[in-house]
Image (spheres, helix red, strand yellow):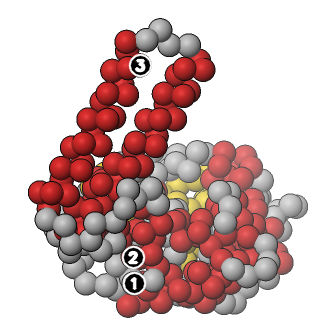
């Protein structure tokens, strides 16, 4: 369908109506014939072509109102719904283009608009978005610029993630940024490997003030080799205990900071073995240490004061 820039909105809407009628006619023809697989595929293909024409017809209405691009349409709509969770289908509808998700990413990455999604927030459906402020965030735009540069590095996904965390340190990175930078779905595994290599990466498990799935590199100093072995053991304990405090049952998503505790204290001969280690939240951990009159810390994150990881 040829572009009709500047057409009156009602005239442009008439094209939408005509296209919708063609779509409905195609569906009616499907109902009136005996469908087999071949005829269904042909009908579905025709419906797809009409759907594309429908997007173009709707975009003519946008242009009639002075909205010249799908990206502009998305931003206008989000600004009219600041703080409200809106479904992805709504953004696809106002954008009138198939690649609406790329336009959302451009608004964040290139212009710094603080658009969050259900990927990074647990209080929204996975396919919803929200604009949290009516002004672009310059710092966010800079972080996304760094993320874009890191994403294009000719190194492994793990090293791209490390480069990004180091570049924005001590600011945290959310899981959407990390997935974008790493270009891998298993970015959490790569984070764990970096942690085991001695990089002192903090997550929402360690600091509940961080959004779920976020990670922070507060220092560029790496832990010594002995600490790296303790980190591996710490992950085993946390996973064995399902990332749950074994006293009160809380998890990081409920505001708990998880720590690893020696059941039999080190000063009483306790060893770093699986049977003598347990996951506790910081409050329950503090309660146990209060009874013993000792200080509270994640005992595997402070191996310099603990027995050897393997031998005790």
* Residue in the foreground of this view, choosing between 17 and 286: 17
Asked if residue 88 is positioned above or below residue 232 in the image, the reply reads above
Q: Residues within 10 Å of mark 2 (few under 14, many from 20)?
A: many
Residue topped by disc 2 = 107
Q: In which quadrant of the rendered image does the C terminus lie?
A: bottom right
Residue topped by disc 1 = 111
Residue topped by disc 3 = 30
**Cα distance in 3D space between marks 3 and 2:** 40 Å
* Residue in the foreground of this view, choosing between 252 and 154: 154
Mark sitting earlier along the chain (3/2): 3
At x 32%, y 35%, the residue is 22
At x 88%, y 61%, the residue is 311
Q: Secondary structure at mark 2?
A: helix
Q: Which mark is residue 194?
A: none
Q: In which quadrant of the rendered image does the N terminus lie?
A: bottom left
Horizontal relation, residue 106 to residue 268: left or right = left
* Residue in the foreground of this view, choosing between 72 and 53: 53
The reply to whether dot 1 and dot 3 touch (C-beta < 8 Å) is: no
- Residue 103 on image: x %, y %: 42, 69
Q: Secondary structure at mark 3?
A: helix
- Residue 210 on image: x %, y %: 44, 70
- Answer whether residue 95 is visible to the viewer in this image: no
* Residue in the foreground of this view, choosing between 158 and 71: 71
Q: Residue 62's quadrant in the figure? A: bottom left
Q: Residue 156's quadrant in the figure? A: bottom right
Residue depth check, mark 3 versus mark 2: number of the one nearer the observer: 3
The reply to whether dot 1 and dot 2 touch (C-beta < 8 Å) is: yes
Q: Quick one: which residue is furthest to the top in this view?
A: 34
Mark sitting earlier along the chain (1/3): 3
């Amino acid at each position: 369908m040829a572009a009709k820039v500047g057409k009156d909105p009602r005239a442009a809407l008439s094209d939408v109506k005509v296209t919708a009628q063609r779509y409905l006619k195609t569906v009616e023809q499907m109902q009136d014939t005996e469908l087999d697989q071949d005829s269904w595929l042909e009908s579905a293909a025709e419906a797809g072509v009409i759907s594309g024409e429908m997007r173009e017809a709707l975009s003519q209405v946008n242009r009639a109102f002075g909205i010249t691009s799908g990206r502009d349409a998305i931003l206008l709509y989000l600004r009219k719904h600041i703080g409200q969770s809106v479904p992805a289908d709504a953004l696809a509808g106002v954008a009138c283009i198939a690649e609406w998700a790329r336009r959302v990413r451009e608004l964040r990455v290139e212009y710094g608009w603080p658009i969050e999604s259900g990927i990074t927030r647990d209080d929204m459906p996975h396919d919803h978005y929200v604009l949290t402020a009516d002004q672009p965030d310059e710092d966010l735009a800079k972080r996304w610029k760094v993320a874009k540069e890191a994403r294009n590095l000719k190194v492994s996904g793990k090293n791209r993630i490390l480069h990004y965390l180091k570049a924005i340190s001590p600011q945290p990175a959310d899981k959407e940024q990390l997935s974008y930078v790493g270009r891998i779905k298993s970015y959490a595994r790569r984070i764990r490997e970096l942690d085991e290599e001695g990089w002192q990466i903090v997550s929402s498990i360690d600091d509940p003030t961080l959004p779920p799935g976020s990670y922070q590199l507060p220092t560029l100093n790496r832990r010594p080799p002995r600490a790296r072995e303790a980190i591996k053991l710490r992950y085993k304990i946390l996973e064995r205990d399902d990332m749950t405090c074994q006293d009160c049952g809380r998890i990081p998503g409920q505001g708990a900071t998880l720590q690893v505790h020696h059941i039999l204290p080190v000063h009483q001969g306790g060893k770093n073995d699986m049977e003598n280690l347990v996951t506790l939240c910081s409050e329950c951990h503090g309660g146990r240490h209060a009874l013993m009159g000792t200080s509270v810390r994640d005992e595997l994150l402070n191996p310099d004061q603990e027995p050897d990881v393997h031998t005790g």
